[in-house]
Image (cartoon, rainbow, N blue to C red):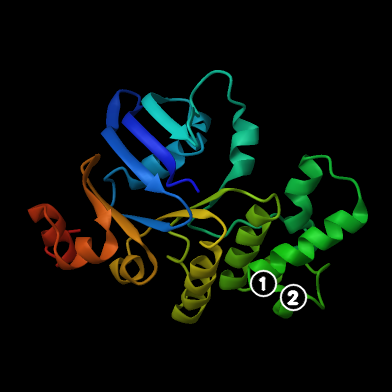
Amino acid sequence: MEKNTFEIKNLNIYYNGFHAVKDISVTIPHNLITAIIGASGCGKSSFLRSLNRMNDLISVSSVSGEVLFRGVNIYDSSVNEISLRRRIGMVFQKPNPFPFSIFDNVAYGLKIQKIRDKSVIQERVQESLKRAFLWEEVKDRLYASALELSGGQQQRLCIARALAVYPDVLLLDEPCSSLDPLATVKIEDLLKKLKKEITIVIVTHNLSQAKRISDYTGFFYSGKLFEFGDTKNIFENPSNSLTREYINGEFG
Protein backbone atom coordinates (compact mmCIF):
# COMPACT_ATOMS: atom_id res chain seq x y z
CA MET A 1 0.00 0.00 0.00
CA GLU A 2 1.13 3.56 -0.71
CA LYS A 3 2.74 5.37 2.17
CA ASN A 4 2.17 8.91 0.91
CA THR A 5 -0.53 10.50 -1.25
CA PHE A 6 1.38 13.74 -1.93
CA GLU A 7 5.02 14.61 -2.13
CA ILE A 8 5.51 18.37 -2.31
CA LYS A 9 8.89 19.70 -3.44
CA ASN A 10 10.02 23.34 -3.16
CA LEU A 11 6.49 24.73 -3.58
CA ASN A 12 6.19 28.50 -3.94
CA ILE A 13 2.97 30.44 -4.55
CA TYR A 14 2.78 34.10 -5.57
CA TYR A 15 -0.12 36.52 -5.97
CA ASN A 16 0.81 39.48 -8.13
CA GLY A 17 4.37 39.18 -6.88
CA PHE A 18 3.41 38.67 -3.21
CA HIS A 19 5.19 35.54 -1.95
CA ALA A 20 2.36 33.74 -0.10
CA VAL A 21 3.83 30.23 0.25
CA LYS A 22 7.59 29.87 0.58
CA ASP A 23 9.59 26.84 -0.49
CA ILE A 24 7.46 24.09 1.07
CA SER A 25 8.72 20.50 0.91
CA VAL A 26 6.62 17.89 2.72
CA THR A 27 4.88 14.55 2.23
CA ILE A 28 1.19 14.01 3.03
CA PRO A 29 0.53 10.45 4.29
CA HIS A 30 -1.99 8.15 2.65
CA ASN A 31 -5.47 7.55 4.17
CA LEU A 32 -4.88 9.64 7.28
CA ILE A 33 -6.01 13.09 8.39
CA THR A 34 -3.46 15.88 8.09
CA ALA A 35 -4.31 19.19 9.77
CA ILE A 36 -2.79 22.50 8.69
CA ILE A 37 -2.72 25.10 11.47
CA GLY A 38 -1.43 28.66 11.82
CA ALA A 39 -2.57 32.25 12.19
CA SER A 40 -4.71 34.01 9.56
CA GLY A 41 -2.80 35.01 6.44
CA CYS A 42 0.04 32.52 6.93
CA GLY A 43 -0.53 30.64 3.65
CA LYS A 44 -2.60 27.66 4.88
CA SER A 45 -5.47 28.01 2.41
CA SER A 46 -3.13 28.85 -0.48
CA PHE A 47 -1.21 25.66 0.25
CA LEU A 48 -4.43 23.64 0.42
CA ARG A 49 -5.68 25.03 -2.90
CA SER A 50 -2.37 24.13 -4.52
CA LEU A 51 -3.10 20.44 -3.95
CA ASN A 52 -5.83 20.38 -6.61
CA ARG A 53 -4.82 23.45 -8.62
CA MET A 54 -7.65 25.64 -7.38
CA ASN A 55 -5.16 28.51 -7.41
CA ASP A 56 -5.28 28.25 -11.21
CA LEU A 57 -8.67 29.98 -10.99
CA ILE A 58 -7.01 33.09 -9.50
CA SER A 59 -5.64 35.05 -12.46
CA VAL A 60 -2.85 36.80 -10.52
CA SER A 61 -1.47 33.59 -8.97
CA SER A 62 1.63 31.70 -10.06
CA VAL A 63 3.24 28.51 -8.74
CA SER A 64 6.71 27.01 -8.86
CA GLY A 65 7.96 23.68 -7.56
CA GLU A 66 6.27 20.30 -7.74
CA VAL A 67 3.19 18.70 -6.20
CA LEU A 68 3.45 14.96 -6.85
CA PHE A 69 0.12 13.17 -6.49
CA ARG A 70 0.79 9.44 -6.48
CA GLY A 71 4.05 10.12 -8.27
CA VAL A 72 2.72 12.48 -10.96
CA ASN A 73 3.38 16.23 -10.87
CA ILE A 74 -0.10 17.78 -10.99
CA TYR A 75 1.36 20.96 -12.52
CA ASP A 76 2.66 19.10 -15.56
CA SER A 77 1.04 20.38 -18.76
CA SER A 78 -0.30 16.89 -19.52
CA VAL A 79 -2.52 16.88 -16.39
CA ASN A 80 -6.19 17.74 -16.93
CA GLU A 81 -7.24 19.89 -13.97
CA ILE A 82 -10.93 18.95 -14.29
CA SER A 83 -10.09 15.25 -13.96
CA LEU A 84 -7.65 16.09 -11.18
CA ARG A 85 -10.35 17.87 -9.14
CA ARG A 86 -12.61 14.85 -9.46
CA ARG A 87 -9.92 12.77 -7.76
CA ILE A 88 -9.05 15.52 -5.27
CA GLY A 89 -12.31 17.02 -4.03
CA MET A 90 -12.62 20.22 -2.00
CA VAL A 91 -15.07 21.49 0.64
CA PHE A 92 -14.98 25.16 1.52
CA GLN A 93 -15.35 27.18 4.70
CA LYS A 94 -18.91 28.29 3.98
CA PRO A 95 -21.32 25.55 2.85
CA ASN A 96 -22.05 26.16 -0.83
CA PRO A 97 -24.93 23.94 -1.94
CA PHE A 98 -26.25 24.70 -5.39
CA PRO A 99 -29.81 26.12 -5.58
CA PHE A 100 -31.10 22.70 -6.59
CA SER A 101 -32.75 19.85 -4.75
CA ILE A 102 -30.79 17.74 -2.28
CA PHE A 103 -30.76 14.90 -4.82
CA ASP A 104 -29.55 17.06 -7.70
CA ASN A 105 -26.76 18.54 -5.59
CA VAL A 106 -25.27 15.11 -4.96
CA ALA A 107 -25.90 13.96 -8.54
CA TYR A 108 -24.29 17.06 -10.05
CA GLY A 109 -20.77 15.63 -10.49
CA LEU A 110 -22.12 12.39 -11.92
CA LYS A 111 -24.02 14.28 -14.62
CA ILE A 112 -20.90 16.30 -15.41
CA GLN A 113 -19.19 12.94 -15.96
CA LYS A 114 -22.00 12.12 -18.39
CA ILE A 115 -23.37 9.26 -16.29
CA ARG A 116 -26.90 8.87 -17.67
CA ASP A 117 -28.12 5.63 -16.09
CA LYS A 118 -30.78 6.75 -13.61
CA SER A 119 -30.43 3.66 -11.46
CA VAL A 120 -26.68 4.24 -11.14
CA ILE A 121 -27.26 7.89 -10.20
CA GLN A 122 -29.96 6.93 -7.69
CA GLU A 123 -27.71 4.34 -6.09
CA ARG A 124 -24.68 6.66 -5.94
CA VAL A 125 -26.70 9.53 -4.42
CA GLN A 126 -28.06 7.28 -1.68
CA GLU A 127 -24.63 5.78 -1.03
CA SER A 128 -22.97 9.21 -0.81
CA LEU A 129 -25.60 10.60 1.55
CA LYS A 130 -25.14 7.55 3.76
CA ARG A 131 -21.38 7.96 3.73
CA ALA A 132 -21.87 11.60 4.77
CA PHE A 133 -24.25 10.49 7.57
CA LEU A 134 -27.05 12.58 6.09
CA TRP A 135 -29.33 9.94 4.53
CA GLU A 136 -31.57 9.35 7.55
CA GLU A 137 -32.17 13.10 7.91
CA VAL A 138 -33.09 13.77 4.26
CA LYS A 139 -34.33 10.50 2.72
CA ASP A 140 -37.96 11.67 2.86
CA ARG A 141 -37.28 15.04 1.21
CA LEU A 142 -34.66 14.38 -1.44
CA TYR A 143 -36.37 16.74 -3.87
CA ALA A 144 -36.67 19.65 -1.43
CA SER A 145 -34.29 22.57 -1.90
CA ALA A 146 -30.85 22.04 -0.44
CA LEU A 147 -31.01 25.63 0.78
CA GLU A 148 -33.64 24.58 3.35
CA LEU A 149 -31.11 22.45 5.21
CA SER A 150 -29.33 23.67 8.35
CA GLY A 151 -25.75 24.89 8.05
CA GLY A 152 -24.34 21.63 9.36
CA GLN A 153 -26.53 19.59 7.03
CA GLN A 154 -25.51 21.77 4.09
CA GLN A 155 -21.85 21.15 4.86
CA ARG A 156 -22.42 17.39 5.03
CA LEU A 157 -24.33 17.67 1.74
CA CYS A 158 -21.28 19.35 0.17
CA ILE A 159 -19.14 16.49 1.45
CA ALA A 160 -21.64 13.99 -0.01
CA ARG A 161 -21.47 15.84 -3.33
CA ALA A 162 -17.68 15.51 -3.31
CA LEU A 163 -17.85 11.83 -2.32
CA ALA A 164 -20.29 10.93 -5.12
CA VAL A 165 -17.53 10.98 -7.74
CA TYR A 166 -15.31 8.67 -5.64
CA PRO A 167 -12.38 11.00 -4.91
CA ASP A 168 -9.05 9.74 -3.63
CA VAL A 169 -8.52 12.87 -1.52
CA LEU A 170 -10.75 15.34 0.32
CA LEU A 171 -9.45 18.84 1.02
CA LEU A 172 -11.36 20.89 3.61
CA ASP A 173 -10.81 24.60 4.27
CA GLU A 174 -12.18 25.51 7.73
CA PRO A 175 -15.27 23.31 7.18
CA CYS A 176 -16.67 23.83 10.70
CA SER A 177 -15.93 27.52 11.27
CA SER A 178 -19.56 28.58 10.79
CA LEU A 179 -21.12 25.56 12.51
CA ASP A 180 -22.41 25.03 16.04
CA PRO A 181 -20.69 22.49 18.33
CA LEU A 182 -23.17 19.66 17.62
CA ALA A 183 -22.82 20.06 13.86
CA THR A 184 -19.04 20.22 14.28
CA VAL A 185 -19.03 16.90 16.16
CA LYS A 186 -20.95 15.26 13.29
CA ILE A 187 -18.46 16.54 10.72
CA GLU A 188 -15.51 15.39 12.83
CA ASP A 189 -17.00 11.92 13.34
CA LEU A 190 -17.61 11.73 9.60
CA LEU A 191 -14.02 12.65 8.75
CA LYS A 192 -12.60 10.09 11.18
CA LYS A 193 -14.63 7.38 9.46
CA LEU A 194 -13.83 8.59 5.93
CA LYS A 195 -10.06 8.42 6.47
CA LYS A 196 -10.32 4.64 6.23
CA GLU A 197 -11.08 5.16 2.55
CA ILE A 198 -9.52 8.47 1.49
CA THR A 199 -6.74 10.90 2.36
CA ILE A 200 -7.97 14.02 4.16
CA VAL A 201 -6.22 17.38 4.49
CA ILE A 202 -7.97 19.98 6.64
CA VAL A 203 -7.12 23.61 7.32
CA THR A 204 -8.40 24.66 10.74
CA HIS A 205 -8.03 27.55 13.20
CA ASN A 206 -9.49 25.28 15.87
CA LEU A 207 -6.49 23.78 17.62
CA SER A 208 -8.68 21.46 19.70
CA GLN A 209 -10.18 20.12 16.48
CA ALA A 210 -6.76 19.50 14.95
CA LYS A 211 -5.70 17.68 18.11
CA ARG A 212 -8.91 15.60 18.21
CA ILE A 213 -9.11 14.36 14.65
CA SER A 214 -5.76 14.55 12.89
CA ASP A 215 -2.94 12.06 12.65
CA TYR A 216 -0.38 14.58 11.38
CA THR A 217 -0.19 18.35 11.79
CA GLY A 218 1.69 21.06 9.92
CA PHE A 219 2.26 24.50 11.45
CA PHE A 220 2.49 27.43 9.02
CA TYR A 221 3.87 30.86 9.84
CA SER A 222 4.41 33.73 7.42
CA GLY A 223 4.13 31.47 4.38
CA LYS A 224 6.57 28.86 5.67
CA LEU A 225 5.99 25.37 7.04
CA PHE A 226 7.79 25.62 10.36
CA GLU A 227 7.01 22.16 11.69
CA PHE A 228 5.33 18.99 10.47
CA GLY A 229 4.87 15.70 12.25
CA ASP A 230 2.77 13.36 14.34
CA THR A 231 -0.06 15.38 15.91
CA LYS A 232 0.61 14.13 19.44
CA ASN A 233 4.24 15.21 19.19
CA ILE A 234 3.39 18.58 17.65
CA PHE A 235 0.99 19.43 20.47
CA GLU A 236 2.83 17.86 23.38
CA ASN A 237 6.47 18.29 22.43
CA PRO A 238 6.93 20.71 19.52
CA SER A 239 10.51 21.09 18.38
CA ASN A 240 10.07 24.69 17.19
CA SER A 241 9.59 27.54 19.68
CA LEU A 242 7.16 29.34 17.35
CA THR A 243 4.99 26.22 17.18
CA ARG A 244 4.96 26.05 20.97
CA GLU A 245 4.02 29.73 21.28
CA TYR A 246 1.16 29.36 18.78
CA ILE A 247 -0.21 26.23 20.43
CA ASN A 248 -0.03 27.93 23.84
CA GLY A 249 -2.07 30.86 22.51
CA GLU A 250 0.71 33.42 22.72
CA PHE A 251 -0.20 34.77 19.24
CA GLY A 252 -2.66 34.06 16.45
- Which quarter shows the C terminus? bottom left
Identified at 21% across, 60% down, the residue is: 234
Tell whether 236 sits left or right of 9: left
Query: Mark 2 and mark 1 in contact (Cβ < 8 Å)?
Result: yes
Tell whether 111 sits left or right of 156: right
In the rendered image, is residue 14 in sight? yes
* Secondary structure at numbered mark 2: helix
Rendering quarter of residue 190: bottom right
Identified at 77% across, 41% down, the residue is: 112
Give, as a three-letter code, the residue at label 1: Leu
Q: Which residue is mark 1?
A: 149
Q: Position of residue 178 (x, y in %)?
A: 46, 67
Above or below, 143 against 30 in this view is below
Q: Position of residue 212 (x, y in %)?
A: 35, 72
Badge 2 crowding class, 10 Å Cα cut-off, few under 14, some 14 to 19, many 20 or more, is some
Above or below, 13 against 251 in this view is above
Q: Which residue is mark 2?
A: 138
* Secondary structure at numbered mark 1: loop
